[in-house]
């Protein structure tokens, strides 16, 4: 029997002569100069190729050429690849033996002394550990050239350099040894992520202008740090490669932090945030570590350590913004808790003042980061910047800063599309942050009804098939790619299927699932994490997103049709019927599954969210009479009661999501139900102290007043006007932040 042939080893794909960008990304470079085609294909900035030293002789004889060739061969040094474990151990041991425990400065001083004492032209290498001196043998200068102005200038420069170096050595000797840069400082440096930005910033700025005209942004609300004209300030997005600011180092960090901030207070507040604030701000009881604890708090602790005793390591402005945003949120929360205790006025004032100072610092550092740390040699990590924006967004949501919340949502989406979705591989931690953003964006978009449609063209909100009227436009009707660089205005209803009259079937493709950050595609994605984080499935959030989009399109049609004809009403009615079937089918399936699962606080909150989804659909799409929704209001009420009982028995201090309580409370008609929802908000406000709950309760009570007045008016005049939170929000210019 013939022995099986040995498998052929695959050829190595690593090119040692590739450009710097391809070498960092670990991809094969085609080595096309000056800019390789591999970088051009992915839209990355090619860092070019390493500089090689060429030895040039002024002699023109063949003998001289042979001498130069031999000299080149003898001095060629190969870059060793320490791929084996034993080689790496030997290299580390040799480095330790050479340096011992001497600091870097001492090693450099010794290297300088050896260099001065070495005999010129001896050919001996002067090296200490990884440091060495590059020696270049020069011809003896002719006497007449030594007296030229250029040579005099060179001598002056050399003399000045020697003097400056002598002074610097004396200054180093006077320093404390703890101030030296030591070897662990070099080995612990954080390397920048290998992510690259598409170079279409002008298009993104145009998108921001479109969003403002379409009403997605409030009038006069800037995009925090990403909206400035590159000419108006240094370090803008298009200019960072020319003059990029350095990260915060030990010499400047004290100047960039407000003097009123006490680091001992910051440490107390970080612990308070981790122990209490996360449970109060999270939409469902935390069964595992939340992304806030895994990432934001962990990053804040490291940042605080680098501010206090690990001062040799650099900091990014994004990391500082995350730290101060968490501190401000925790300080306000702690002040609200202390208000219940007697004789606590001084403590409350102290924490409130600290919250005011730290949130200003967080805003300042975030603006700096978005202007100067998005790209360039000193760019911040993508996760640090996204964590900072999410922390600022959460502060704005919890403490009812409505214009700021809208601006931070757009900032987060823009950063996510520019840096997050452009990555070849999206890490699990980045995906966790994407899920946190998606939840906040979709839930808060569901209650935003303040858009302006005055300058809107209805053709822009139609599916692509209605726009493809000519043969040249047929390409527009093709399925949308998974990565859409345009910012989302929640005025689009698109499918990934070719047949728009039928819902796509099957699961989402991997790439589409990762890039569908606003869940426009209603298909299921096997790798979604919403059930783990919030208890609900991705389908629930997708239906909320789709209902919001359809409701916004209906509002736009009702406003614009007065001046512009809309001929696609049949398509609009088809979308209503289809979405109604999907919502009702999902809610009924959830109730059947809920009866067979073990009782857990999360299960009861999911029941409340499912019933509230039905209420949300019939209020925003059908705008039915509240009497029709009373059965669903009862379901939400019972689910919230079961949730409170389960949390109490499990000793869980978590009020849960206010979204279902608000949706059901605004439709409650009986006095008993209204008292329950009013008490529910009072308890949540007392527990958390978040002002957003105060605003939600105010809107709910205003709806009740209008409903009672409308009932009396209909009895007298026969009027048939339906009042809801939508009308109250428009009249009072309110945006309920309930994520």
Image (cartoon, rainbow, N blue to C red):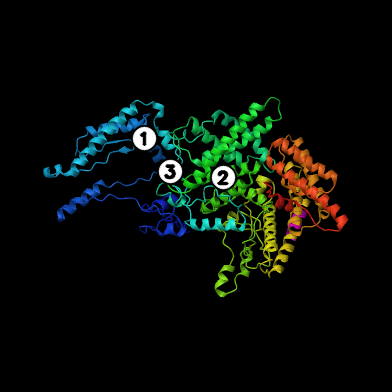
Q: Mark 1 or mark 3, which is nearer the start of the sequence?
A: 1
Picture coordinates of residue 623, whole percent (x, y): 77, 57
Asked if residue 652 shows in the view, the reply is no
Asked if residue 128 shows in the view, the reply is yes
Specify the farthest residue to the front.
717
In reply to whether residue 585 is colored magenta, the answer given is yes
Circle 3 or circle 1, nearest the eye: 3
Q: Give the residue at mark 3.
A: 245
**In the picture, residue 691 is in which quadrant?**
top right
SS of the residue at dot 2? helix
Q: Residues within 10 Å of mark 1 (few under 14, many from 20)?
A: some
Residue in front for this viewpoint, 10 or 610:
610
Q: Is residue 723 left or right of residue 333?
A: right
In reply to whether residue 212 is colored magenta, the answer given is no
Gap between marks 1 and 2, in whole Å? 42 Å
Circle 1 or circle 2, nearest the eye: 2
Q: Give the residue at mark 2.
A: 389
Please tell me which residue is depicted at 37% across the width and 59% down the height of the picture: 32
Q: Give the residue at mark 1.
A: 95
Q: Mark 3 or mark 2, which is nearer the start of the sequence?
A: 3
């Amino acid at each position: 029997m013939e022995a099986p042939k040995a498998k052929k080893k695959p050829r190595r794909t690593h090119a040692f002569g590739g450009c710097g960008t391809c070498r960092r990304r670990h991809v094969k470079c085609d080595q096309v100069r000056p800019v390789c085609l591999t970088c051009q294909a992915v839209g990355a900035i090619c860092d070019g190729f390493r500089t090689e030293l060429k030895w040039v002789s002024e002699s023109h004889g063949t003998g001289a050429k042979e001498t130069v060739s031999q000299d080149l061969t003898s001095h060629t040094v190969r870059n060793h690849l320490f791929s084996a474990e034993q080689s790496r151990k030997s290299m580390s041991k040799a480095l330790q033996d050479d340096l011992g425990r001497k600091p870097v400065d001492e090693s450099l001083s010794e290297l300088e002394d050896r260099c001065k004492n070495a005999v010129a032209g001896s050919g001996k290498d002067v090296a200490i550990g990884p440091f060495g001196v590059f020696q270049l043998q020069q011809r003896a200068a002719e006497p007449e050239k030594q007296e030229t102005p250029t040579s005099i200038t060179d001598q002056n420069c050399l003399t000045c350099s020697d003097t400056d170096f002598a002074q610097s050595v004396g200054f180093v000797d006077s320093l404390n040894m703890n101030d030296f840069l030591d070897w662990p400082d070099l080995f612990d440096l954080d390397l920048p992520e290998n992510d690259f930005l598409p170079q279409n910033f002008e298009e993104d700025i145009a998108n921001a202008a479109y969003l403002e005209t379409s009403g997605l942004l409030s009038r006069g609300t800037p995009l925090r740090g990403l909206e400035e004209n590159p000419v108006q300030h240094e370090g803008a997005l298009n200019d960072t490669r020319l003059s990029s600011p350095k990260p915060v180092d030990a010499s400047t960090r004290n100047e960039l932090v407000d003097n009123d901030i006490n680091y001992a207070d910051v440490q107390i507040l970080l612990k308070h945030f981790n122990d209490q604030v996360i449970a109060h701000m999270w939409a469902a009881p935390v069964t595992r570590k939340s992304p806030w604890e895994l990432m934001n708090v962990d990053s804040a602790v490291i940042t605080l350590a680098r501010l206090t005793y690990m001062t040799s390591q650099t900091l990014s402005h994004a990391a500082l913004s995350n730290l101060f945003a968490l501190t401000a949120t925790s300080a306000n929360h702690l002040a609200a808790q202390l208000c219940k205790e007697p004789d606590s006025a001084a403590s409350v004032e102290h924490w409130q003042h600290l919250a005011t100072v730290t949130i200003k610092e967080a805003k300042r550092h975030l603006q700096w980061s978005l202007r100067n740390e998005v790209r360039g040699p000193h760019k911040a990590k993508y996760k640090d910047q996204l964590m900072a924006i999410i922390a600022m967004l959460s502060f704005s949501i919890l403490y009812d800063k409505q214009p700021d919340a809208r601006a931070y949502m757009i900032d987060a989406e823009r950063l996510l599309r520019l840096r997050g979705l452009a990555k070849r591989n999206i890490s699990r931690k980045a995906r966790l942050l994407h899920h946190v953003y998606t939840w906040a964006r979709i839930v808060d978009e569901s209650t935003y009804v303040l858009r302006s449609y005055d300058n809107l063209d209805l053709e822009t909100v139609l599916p692509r098939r209605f726009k493809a009227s000519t043969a040249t436009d047929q390409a527009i009707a093709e399925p949308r790619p998974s990565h859409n660089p345009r910012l989302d205005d929640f005025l689009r209803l698109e499918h990934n299927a070719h047949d728009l009259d039928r819902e796509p079937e099957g699961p989402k493709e991997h790439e589409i699932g990762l890039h569908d950050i606003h869940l426009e595609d209603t298909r299921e994605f096997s790798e979604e994490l919403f059930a783990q984080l919030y208890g609900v499935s991705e389908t629930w959030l997708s239906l909320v997103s789709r209902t919001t989009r359809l409701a916004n399109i209906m509002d736009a049609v009702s406003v614009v049709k007065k001046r512009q004809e809309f001929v696609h009403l049949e398509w609009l009615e088809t979308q209503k019927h289809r979405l109604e079937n999907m919502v009702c089918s999902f809610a009924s399936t959830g109730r059947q599954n809920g009866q067979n699962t073990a009782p857990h606080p999360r299960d009861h909150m999911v029941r409340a969210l499912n019933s509230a989804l039905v209420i949300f659909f019939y209020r925003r799409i059908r705008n039915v009479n509240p009497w029709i929704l009373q059965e669903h209001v009862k379901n939400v009420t019972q689910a919230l009661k079961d949730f409170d009982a389960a949390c109490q028995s499990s000793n869980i201090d978590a009020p849960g999501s206010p979204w279902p309580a608000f949706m059901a409370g605004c439709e409650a008609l009986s006095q008993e139900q209204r008292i329950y929802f009013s008490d529910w908000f009072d308890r949540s406000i007392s527990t958390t102290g978040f002002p957003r709950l105060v605003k939600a309760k105010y809107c709910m009570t205003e709806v009740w007043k209008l409903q009672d007045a409308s009932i009396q008016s209909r009895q007298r005049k026969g009027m048939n006007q339906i009042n809801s939170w939508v009308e109250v929000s428009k009249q009072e210019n309110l945006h309920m932040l309930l994520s």
